[in-house]
């Protein structure tokens, strides 16, 4: 048995396992981001309230994308994270420095992963020693969930900040969404207020 073939086979296996592990851990990761109105000042923000009695903004069709318990968890998590940052919650939205709304959505995604297939032999009938590899492509479908948080100035009523978090929705998330909700909200509110 050729030692180079054995080494190449083991190297391919290690690389493929590394790529699969990185892909799986990447799917479980919460990705987040934020942007804000560059002309807005966040220095005097001390109090907050919900934009309405129901702070969840519904998309087209006005259909609830989540259950009542998950909705309650999101609302409480946002309030807890803002309070932990020193902001004071007010029931009267007209007296608050800023008001908060959020939105939830999901979409199906397809990921294609390619990697070299096993050794295929000699390339050409007289070019001995030349090897080639086929590329294998695998497709995987998954659901991506996104949570968005919007902040509006209490006086101008204008939107001043938007933060979001997204992650692959696993069966564990469906069975118990609480950990994913808390982690996502924490990742979003960590970015508020924006750094100068």
Image (tube, rainbow, N blue to C red):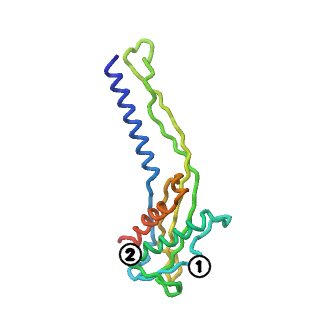
Classify 89 as above or below 174. below
Classify 3 as above or below 16. above
Q: Nearer the viewer, residue 114 or 170?
A: 170
Going by the picture, which residue comes out furthest to the front?
175
- Name the quadrant of the N terminus: top left
Name the residue rendered at 59%, 75% in the picture.
Answer: 54
Going by the picture, which residue comes out furthest to the top?
126
State the SS at label 1.
Answer: loop
Real-space Cα separation, disc 1 to disc 2, in angstroms: 23 Å
State the SS at label 2.
Answer: loop
Residue 53: assigned label: 1
What percent of the width, then of the height, locates residue 73?
52, 68
Residue 85: assigned label: 2
User: Quick one: label 1, few (<14), some, or many (20+) residues within 10 Å?
Assistant: few
Left or right of 108 in this view: 28: left
Task: Give the image quarter of residue 11.
Answer: top left
Left or right of 83 in this view: 57: right
What percent of the width, then of the height, locates residue 111?
52, 44
What percent of the width, then of the height, locates residue 120?
45, 21
- Name the quadrant of the C terminus: bottom left
Q: Nearer the viewer, residue 165 or 133?
A: 165
Q: Earlier in the sequence, mark 1 or mark 2?
A: 1
Name the residue rendered at 55%, 78% in the picture.
Answer: 51
Going by the picture, which residue comes out furthest to the left?
3
Name the residue rendered at 52%, 72% in the picture.
Answer: 75
Classify 26 as above or below 123. below
Q: How many marks?
A: 2
Q: Nearer the viewer, residue 178 or 40?
A: 178
Q: Nearer the viewer, residue 90 or 164?
A: 90
User: Quick one: label 2, few (<14), some, or many (20+) residues within 10 Å?
Assistant: few
């Amino acid at each position: 048995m050729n030692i180079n073939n054995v080494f190449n086979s083991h190297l391919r296996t290690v690389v493929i396992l590394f790529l699969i592990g990185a892909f799986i851990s990447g799917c479980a990761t919460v990705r987040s981001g934020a942007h804000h109105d560059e002309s807005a000042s966040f220095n005097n923000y001390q109090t907050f309230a919900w934009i309405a009695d129901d702070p969840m903004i519904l998309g087209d069709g006005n259909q609830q994308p989540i259950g009542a318990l998950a909705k309650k968890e999101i609302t409480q998590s946002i309030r807890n994270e803002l309070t932990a940052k020193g902001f004071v919650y007010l029931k009267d939205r007209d007296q608050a420095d800023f008001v908060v709304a959020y939105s939830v959505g999901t979409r199906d995604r397809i990921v294609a992963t390619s990697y070299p297939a096993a050794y295929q032999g000699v390339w050409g009938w007289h070019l001995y020693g030349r090897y080639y590899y086929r590329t294998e492509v695998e497709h995987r479908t998954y659901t991506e969930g996104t949570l968005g948080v919007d902040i509006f100035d209490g006086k101008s009523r204008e939107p001043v900040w938007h933060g979001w978090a997204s992650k692959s929705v696993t069966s564990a998330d469906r069975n118990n969404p609480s950990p994913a909700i808390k982690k996502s909200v924490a990742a979003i509110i960590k970015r508020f207020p924006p750094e100068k």
